[in-house]
Amino acid sequence: MNTTARTRAFLKIHPLFGAVFLVELLFVAALLAGSFRPLAEVSIPLESMTQSEDGTSVSQPVTLSSGGYRITVCYQAAFPEEPERTDGTAVATLDFSSAGNPAAVQSDAITLTDTFSTVTARLWVSTASTVSDLTLRVTETLAEGQTFALQSVTLTEQSVWRVTSLVGWLLLFAVADALLSLLFLGRTPRAPRCGWGVVLLLAGGIVLASLPYCADFLYTGHDLRFHCYRIWAAAQALADGQFPVRMFTDGFHGYGAATPLYYCDLFLYIPALLYNAFLPLQTCYQIYVLLVNTATMLLAYYSFARIGEQRLYGAVAAFAYTLCAYRLTNMMIRASVGEYTAMTFLPLVALGAWAIARHERPAARDWLPLGLGMAGIVQSHLLTTELAAIFLALFWICNLQVMVRPPRLLAALKAVLTAVGLTAWFLLPCMQTLNGQKIMISDVHPAPLQSTGTYLIQLLGFFGVSSGSSGAGTTGDMPLTLGLAGCLALGLALWCCLRRDCWQKTPDTQRRWLGLRGSLALCLLAMWMSTTSFPWDWLANKLPQKIVDILLKPQFSWRYLAVAVVLAGVISVLALRLTEELAPRLARGVAVALVASTLLYVGAFYRDYAYSKETITLISTETVTDFPYETMGYDYLPAGADLATFDRVQATTRDKDVTAVWLGQGNLECQNDTDSTAEVELPLLAYQHYTARDAATGELLPLTENEQHCLRVTLPAGYRGTVQVRYTPPFAWRIAELVTLATALGLAGWAVQGYRRRRRERIQEETVQEDFIHV
């Protein structure tokens, strides 16, 4: 029977599915047909704007069809009596709306300041909608003596949005069809090897963790704007051709920010590329959170299932870890993207350390998780890297007699080389920049950790009780606790310790008991280090200064909860396996209790925190005015830089016979009519590795640092032309990038080769079995 005949027979049996599929095909065909129409470009009529009762100006309505549009606003704002004055204040706010179909229009308010004369933003009209009454409302917020003139507002449709929209609808239909095949076709799919219970736990955990992000807004978090700014700035840099991104060229009103050199943005390239595909910024962030939750759940399941050698208990531990109290705090309350991304890889580090210690001759599958896990943490959050390294060292010291054997030392060395190779592209520039340039954060000594610890009522609070007296942001709205499930895991582990004489003396049981004992000890240590009772001040006075600086780098002692919760996952899966040997029903009951207690905490957390938090919309953010300087990561500015400098984006010179016009994007048009060299102050921060060249001849021009820690270019006598200032990474950084590329390709090639080898072996085994059956 050919494909056409099979399709007809299938549709006769399942007419409902055929009808749904036909509707989907017609919808996709309509989208494809609409994608060939000419791109629209609409100018808002400004000459006929009328004053409303509240003093704002309203334009005449225009018609706009469905699509994604880039808004370009040209205007002039000045102080006539002080032509050179610019202070970065807002002069007007622009809002687009539709009275007849308000839900079809999606756009943020556009803030105009006297720093610029042109800004861009984004606007969407939803699929299959046409707005016939789109109006622009202009609200002026002028200072005394300031004038404002709106020159033009143009909406240009973007072709990339048509592709993005089509791909999005296709993905949505594919998911819907898959669900229909499960719900309505009457087929019972074959259960996966791990079982439906594991699948439901993993899928349910991902959905629950991502539930607060299935909305048309974002809950406010401590660092939300900073990380959204990182996504926006990385998107702009990628669009300009930077890869990897070393400099946020559009940061701080175009002065530039070297944030990526100190805070790795690798994983943020995913939402940045989505933003360049013309998705709203908050949608890009929401997709990123969904991907991180999925990766956290799957990697935690893989790690805990291998440690406990039981898939169901591994899924229970992964469920509790992904939805643990501290991780929810990082995601929702703190919006600490780097830290909750790093927590994705902590289970891999725990698995790698456990596997190397367990096996006499560790194979690649034993040491590779440690290398990959540490590489992921380094490229997510350097402070979490330090915490993981400290506890890895403690684990090694506690198991020194076992770990110093040559095969294990070799495995650990392979893991280190893997991690270094995968992160060389970031580590080398980071270390060189830290050593070669003083930045703002260099002048700030880490705060004592003693005052930032938690109290027992916080740490062991079942539902995230905050005492409000531990400082550093823990007051009132920041639960720092293991949660009900974490406390239950500790209780089960202590019960197992009390029953240690009841276990069978088999090698597997003995190995699990030793693993449980060591993990419990390290978990309790991490919990202690996160509290106010740990002697941080005493250590600061007794230890050498270099060691103290390392210990104080995490800023807040409650960060050690990240280590505690991953060790709680290890403890729970090992304790469940040990309990199963004595009382299988008790083990299953405790597993159910772990899931139930996790659900109970999540419900209480969402009720008390998520739904009481303020919300924010970041839809069409494409103007730097949407990010206050304090949210742009000013810690990474050159030491001594003044934030007020960024309100003036133009080149200046002290000589009246020298003219200089800043064109943006690192281009300076200038003319020196004097008989001597002249200096021009540039609106670029004085980071290392900038070069200035004449655009026509390529002649290198001197660059120095001025009093405002910005760049100053020296022009030769009689010079006339365009100067191009570019950020040029050193050659050694390119070598480091090649090392990372070679490491990644080597691992990929090794994985493919191993897969092919295992497949050949499986085929050979099946062939031998078939021959035996025939015989």
Image: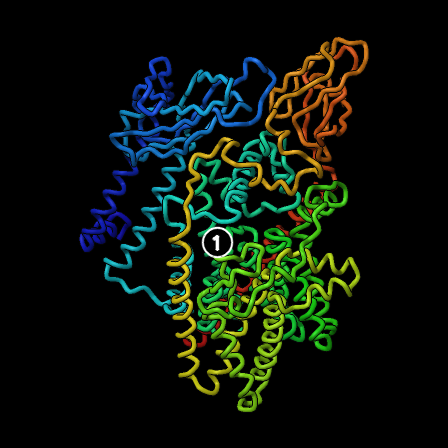
Q: Nearer the viewer, residue 237 or 5?
A: 237
**Label 1: which residue?**
333
Name the colouring of the figure.
rainbow
Going by the image, does 17 lie left or right of 200? left
> Which residue is pictured at 51% across the width and 83% down the height?
495
Left or right: where 707 falls relative to 226: right
For residue 408, what is the image quadrant?
Answer: bottom right
**Residue 706, position in %: x, y?**
74, 28
- Front residue of 708/685: it is 708
The reply, left or right, for residue 548 in relation to residue 131 is right
Residue at screen point 57% across, 82% down: 508
In this view, 720 is above or below 237:
above
Which quadrant holds residue 571?
bottom right
Q: Measured along the vertical axis of the image, is residue 614 above or below residue 326?
A: above
* Residue at far front of view: 144
Q: Identity of the amino acid at label 1?
A: Ile
Image quarter of residue 684: top right
Image coordinates of residue 421 in percent, x first then y, are 68, 53
Residue 241 seen in the current view: no
Q: Is residue 405 left or right of residue 276?
A: right
